[in-house]
Amino acid sequence: MRAGATSALRLDAMPGMFFSASPKELKGTDHSLLEDKTQKRRPKTFGMDVKAYLRSMLPHLESGMKPSKSKDILSVDEVMQWSQSLEKLLANQTGQDVFGNFLKSEFSEENIEFWLACEDYKKTESDLLHCKAEKIYKAFVQSDAAKQINIDFRTRESTAKKIKAPTPTCFDEAQKVIYTLMEKDSYPRFLKSNTYLNLLNDLQANSLK
């Protein structure tokens, strides 16, 4: 590779790579959030997808394109920061995507989907709160929800009461429970997973070329 080659990956050209829903996509909860939970039983192939993606990006890396400060750039430093805290990981759009796909491999993607839905809900205009609160509750919180999250009975009942007169904070209690669950359970495994380590190692290797 030429000396001027970049140490980062462009994310605006991802051939064949599909990441989890962004907050904007979660606004249309009718089709994405109410998906049958039985469809979650899929092969754990995300680690292979990451490798395939990185291989597909090598021609772009070897073309000698110059580094950019665009938000579409994934750098070694950025990925290393994901290991500092779950908060930093989720503050990064690409971090959300990669972590979301890791959760899919563990059949627990409803956790990040709910967390993202709550983040989006907080920005909702007041006249739309009731409609969106109902959708989130039915998709994730109620006892027979298609993507039921793992929260205790008291939190579930408390949330059910709050959405009857919804406010931007009515899901905060449940969201905190799920955040803590991800922070103590899924996040440590993510940092030790091939999904994260292979991505970081490949980025570091390319930065040395």
Image (cartoon, rainbow, N blue to C red):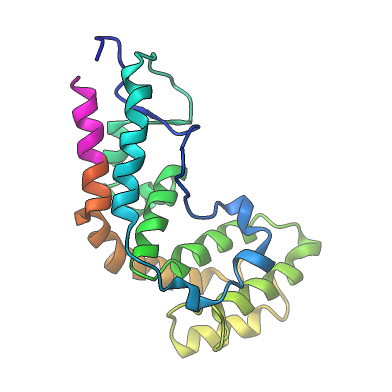
Judged left or right of residue 165, residue 140 is left
User: Does the rendering let one see residue 147?
Assistant: no
Quick check: is 96 in the magenta stretch?
no
Task: Give coordinates of residue 150: x percent, y percent.
Answer: 42, 80
Task: Give coordinates of residue 114: x percent, y percent.
Answer: 52, 67
In the displayed structure, 65 sits above or below 157; it is: above
Of the pair 199 and 87, the residue shown nearer to us: 199
> Residue 119 sits in which quadrant?
bottom right
Say which residue appears at 23% left-offset and 35% top-offset.
Answer: 202
In the displayed structure, 68 sits above or below 140; it is: above
Quarter holding the N terminus?
top left
Judged left or right of residue 176, residue 186 is left
In the displayed structure, 36 sits above or below 200; it is: below
Of the pair 106 and 94, the residue shown nearer to us: 106
Say which residue appears at 34% left-offset and 13% top-offset.
Answer: 64
Q: Which residue occupies the extreme right position in the image?
A: 127
Quarter holding the C terminus?
top left
Say which residue appears at 23% left-offset and 24% top-offset.
Answer: 207
> Residue 11 sits in which quadrant?
top left
Judged left or right of residue 12, residue 54 is left
Say which residue appears at 37% left-offset and 48% top-offset.
Answer: 89
| SS majority, magenta | helix
Query: Which contiguous range is marked in magenta?
Result: 200-209
User: Does the rendering let one see residue 140?
Assistant: yes
Task: Give coordinates of residue 18: x percent, y percent.
Answer: 48, 49
